[in-house]
Image: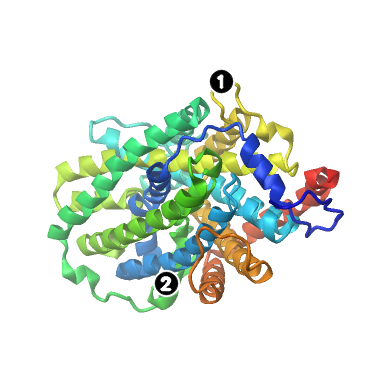
């Protein structure tokens, strides 16, 4: 074990000593109840959701066309590079905090803060996006039973105004996505109750939605119209975007922008790494869960995207079809019974995505608060449930309010930025550490790291520059805000100042 030598460093690049990580592991108040299959289920629970059930429609219509499968391959390649790097880090530092903790122990405090701040954006925006997606499927599900919620109670103000205009209605004075607001509070309650309850809920939902995805692939294959795949890569052109403004789509540029748009769907394996504090054998099981969940879900994504764009022409995925494209494809094929199954599975399945994202969010907060970079409020553990309940309530409050009043497209791009930024930084951090400290014990070693790490950095950075311009600008503002918080509060309150 590392000796307890003083840090004696007030620079922004000071590193958290390894013995402090060991102390965090030994003093953790969290319950260690997650085995490798529960961890894998957490990864799958977060990955299978918005990407398959919602953003496939948006990415096909506005970006890649039938070549959406190639977008998933490009995104998957960027992810597998990052996943291998995550696996190596997770085996060395099995603590909550994910990439933030890895960077703090290897590169330095400012670098770690930037990653942690990006993860906050990633998880919060991800949960908001999925809450809005869930609302779309929930409304479709109750519509199948003849129940209709007024449009101003199921849409954010912008979407409600657009709906009113398209349907010749008067624009409402007030609008709220009430289902999205309420589902966030249900998930918040489950998370406060305890990790074992949350994991058990997630495991049941994962079984259901994996079965639903396989159902979509197998049954949908019988309704594929090959002409819908022609041309597989449409010629580049300019079309009206989601905001009504001209938007470059299709061709190889569309494939790359499509990969950027759906990238947040791969957030799941990152969420696995936030659960180290509750894993039974984190050094061994976390690399397994990270890589297994990614590989399984990438294959499912590619197959579903091929079925979807084969069943329905990408140009026909408009209006309400964008909110529930898979169900819409089966509806158009005249398979109403399948629509019910898919809509039910998606409605239930998206809950687990939200659950894992909000779970990951609070664990990143917990790791940063333990280091003094965030206030002690974020590390307070409930005496009975052994969960960071105060930060969970705060996250639930913010996520529910934003999801109730914000359109889905902007939320998705902001989530993708946070994910891509974190992945690129992890690839860089593990590469630097391998060169600086090659003899450190690594229960799992990423193969061919000198090739994998640079490629991971390049692919993820390229995808960042293919996000929408507005998302890029807002992300820069978020990072600048993070730097202000670091220099005003976090640096002055860092626990390393006391060593």
Res. 354 image quadrant: top left
Q: Could you say which disc has been placed on residue 254 in the image?
A: 2
Q: In which quarter of the image is residue 226?
A: bottom left
Q: Which residue is drawn at 17% across and 55% down?
A: 218
Circle 1 is placed at which residue position? 384
Residue 385 higher or lower than 344, as above or below: above
Indicate the position of residue 464 as horizontal and vertical percent values: 55, 66
Asked whether residue 221 is in view, the answer is yes
Q: Are marks 2 and 1 in contact (CB under 8 Å)?
A: no
- The residue at 35%/79% (across/down) is 235
Q: Is residue 32 above or below residue 46?
A: above
Q: Say whether residue 138 is visible.
A: no
The earlier-in-sequence mark between 2 and 1 is: 2
What's the residue at 44%, 75% (across, down)? Answer: 253
Q: How dense is the environment of label 2, judged by Cα within 10 Å: few (below 14), some, or many (20 and up)?
A: many
Position of 482 compared to 173: left or right? right
Viewer-proximal residue, 219 or 65?
Answer: 219
Counting the numbered discs, the total is 2
Query: Whole-percent x and y of residue 69?
Result: 32, 67
Horizontal and vertical percent position of residue 220 = 18, 56
Q: Which residue lies furthest to the top in this view?
A: 384
Q: How far from the left and from the top, in percent, is residue 153?
A: 43, 33
Question: What color scheme is it?
Answer: rainbow
SS at badge 2: helix
Disc 2/disc 1 C-alpha distance (Å): 50 Å
């Amino acid at each position: 074990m590392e000796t307890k030598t003083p840090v004696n460093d007030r620079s922004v690049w000071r590193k958290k000593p390894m013995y402090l990580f060991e102390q965090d592991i030994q003093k953790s108040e969290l319950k260690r109840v997650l085995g490798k299959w529960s961890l894998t289920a957490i990864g799958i629970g977060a990955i299978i959701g918005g990407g398959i059930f919602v953003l496939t429609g948006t990415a096909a219509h506005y970006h890649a066309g039938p070549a959406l499968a190639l977008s998933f391959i490009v995104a998957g390649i960027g992810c597998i590079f990052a996943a291998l790097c995550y696996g190596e880090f997770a085996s060395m530092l099995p603590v909550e905090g994910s990439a933030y903790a890895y960077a703090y122990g290897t590169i330095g405090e400012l670098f770690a803060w930037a990653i942690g701040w990006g993860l906050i954006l990633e998880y919060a925006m991800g949960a908001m996006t999925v809450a809005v997606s869930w609302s779309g499927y929930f409304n479709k599900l109750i519509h199948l039973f003849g129940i209709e919620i007024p449009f101003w109670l199921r849409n954010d103000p912008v979407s409600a105004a657009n709906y009113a205009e398209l349907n010749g209605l008067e624009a409402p004075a007030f609008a709220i996505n009430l289902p999205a607001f309420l589902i966030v509070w249900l998930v918040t309650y489950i998370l406060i109750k305890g990790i074992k309850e949350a994991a058990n809920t997630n495991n049941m939902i994962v079984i259901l939605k994996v079965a639903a995805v396989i159902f979509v692939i197998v049954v949908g294959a019988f309704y594929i119209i090959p002409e819908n795949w022609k041309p597989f890569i449409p010629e580049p052109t300019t079309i009206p975007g989601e905001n009504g403004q001209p938007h470059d789509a299709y061709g190889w540029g569309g494939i790359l922008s499509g990969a950027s748009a759906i990238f947040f769907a791969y957030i799941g394996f990152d969420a696995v790494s936030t659960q180290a504090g509750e894993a039974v054998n984190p050094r061994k099981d976390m690399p397994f869960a990270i890589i297994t969940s990614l590989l399984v879900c990438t294959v499912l994504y590619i197959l579903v995207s091929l079925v979807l764009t084969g069943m329905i022409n990408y140009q026909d995925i408009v209006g309400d079809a964008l909110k529930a494209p898979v169900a819409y494809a089966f509806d158009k094929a005249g398979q109403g019974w399948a629509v019910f199954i898919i809509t039910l599975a998606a409605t239930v399945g998206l809950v687990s995505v939200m659950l894992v994202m909000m779970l990951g969010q609070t664990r990143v907060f917990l790791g940063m608060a333990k280091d003094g970079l965030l206030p002690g409020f974020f590390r307070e553990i409930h005496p009975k449930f052994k969960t960071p309940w105060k930060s969970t309530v705060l996250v639930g409050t913010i996520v529910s309010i934003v999801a109730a009043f914000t359109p889905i497209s902007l939320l998705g791009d902001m989530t993708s930025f946070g994910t891509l930024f974190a992945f690129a930084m992890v690839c860089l951090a593990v590469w630097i550490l391998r060169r600086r400290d090659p003899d450190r014990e690594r229960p799992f070693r990423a193969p061919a790291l000198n090739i994998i790490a640079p490629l991971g950095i390049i692919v993820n950075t390229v995808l960042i520059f293919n996000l929408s311009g507005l998302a890029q600008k807002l992300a820069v503002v978020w990072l600048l805000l993070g730097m202000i918080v670091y220099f005003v509060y976090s640096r002055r309150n860092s626990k390393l100042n006391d060593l």
